Amino acid sequence: MSMVRLNGVDLHVEEVPAEGIQTGTAVLIHGMTSDSMASWFLTLAHPLAQTGLRVLLYDLRGHGHSSRPATGYSLNDFVGDLEALISDHWQVDGPVHLFGNSFGGTVAFAYAARHPDRVAGIAAIESAPPTADWFRRMGSKLARVAETLADAEAVANSRPLVARRVRAASELLAQTSVGSELPLSVLPAPELIAGIRCPVLCLYGGESAVKELIGETERLLPHSQHVVIEGQRHTLLIKAPSQVQAHVASWLSASASV
Amino acid sequence: MPSDQTAVLADVDSMLRGVLGDFGPDAEIDRDTTFRDDLGMESLDVVSLAGRLQARYGNSVNFAFFVSTLDVASVGDLTVGQLVDYIAESLDKVPAAS
């Protein structure tokens, strides 16, 4: 297991080398609370490497095997970690493809708003750019999850097979400021988000409420593509990886030929 | 000559115990042991196991690719025996050094 220390935290990183001649670099970013790099590693990481991308993964601060500081969970903290990983640790030259699941997609959009020329494309799953509406929704979701997980032992005992992951999510919410800090994040100005010019693909589950944000994302990013996959929920990436992969593959080859 | 399944199983046993640490099973790990129900493996443990297999066998055993061909739910249904067979098969494909 590889750990890297930056911005005062230890981050768990992994890499899947490109197969054959490297055509680009992809960074895969997972979602909030009970998610980790595993949801990418077990789904798209290897198919993407087979297409010639150098695939880079990490656990967000507070998640997976990365360390869990008591504070430091604003959007800027997460974007700062991604900046440090890409430029200092992985030392990527040239623009990267960013893949984000849920909140991971939001980190990708926020990074691209800061560095539009350093991003080759964004594929966001069940996600949205960092807008006030989206952060309100994430804030109330975090509060609901915190309430559900408040009695971690009861949850763990009722579902022993997910005991450790539930406990980790519960500790993140109970022992850190993420629930109060993240919803109060300073968001990028809408014109900075609108300055993202790279190809953008957004995938949604037909049964999830996140697709209600399509209109706002289209207003900010008129060139973005949106696909709703029927019958799927917020767990789209891990429940329907082959459908996600198919959409990503055709989007990648279309954007490469532009 | 086929790779020694007993030796591979012993390797896998120690790697799994390394990954699971304090959460590892008290009982013996055998071919019928399942990842999720018997070992309580979570998805991130599978990532760690892939790293240990890579360190032990190098590129001749691409477990990470193997799991990406399964859906996430069936990774939990994997048995130690299936993993041992996959490793042994992969090692047998490696041309002999001589």
Image (cartoon, grey):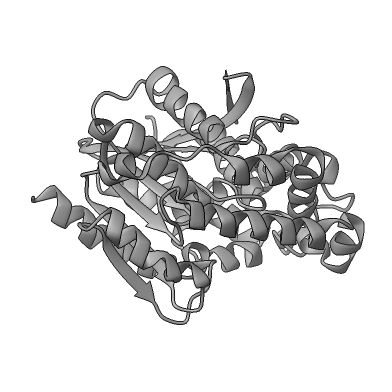
At 58% from the left edge and 45% from the top edge, which residue is drawn? Answer: B47
Residue A129 vertical position relative to residue A234 in the rendered view, above or below: above
Left or right position of A85 against A162: left
| Residue at the left extreme of this rendering | A258
Quick check: B17 left or right of B68?
Answer: right
Instruction: Say which of A211 and A99 sits in front.
Output: A211
In the image, residue A154 above or below residue A220: below
The image shows residue A20 at horizontal and vertical percentages of 23, 39
Residue plotted at (22% across, 50% down) = A199
Q: Could you say where residue A35 lies in the image, as x and y percent from the top left?
A: 61, 52
Q: Is residue A33 left or right of residue A160?
A: left
User: What is the tally of numbered marks visible in this picture?
Assistant: 0
The reply to whether residue B90 is in sight is no
The image quadrant of residue A221 is: bottom left
- When the figure is inspected, residue A30 is found, relative to residue A254, above or below; the finding is above
User: In front here: A71 or B61?
Assistant: A71
In this rendering, is residue A208 above or below B25? below
Q: Position of residue A82 (x, y in %)?
A: 46, 31
**Where's the N terminus of chain A, which quadrant?**
top right
Pick the residue in front: B89 or A187: A187
Instruction: Tell me if I can see residue A85 in this picture.
Output: yes
Instruction: Give the x, y percent position of residue B87.
Output: 53, 49
Query: Looking at the image, which residue is at 85% across and 40% down?
Result: B22
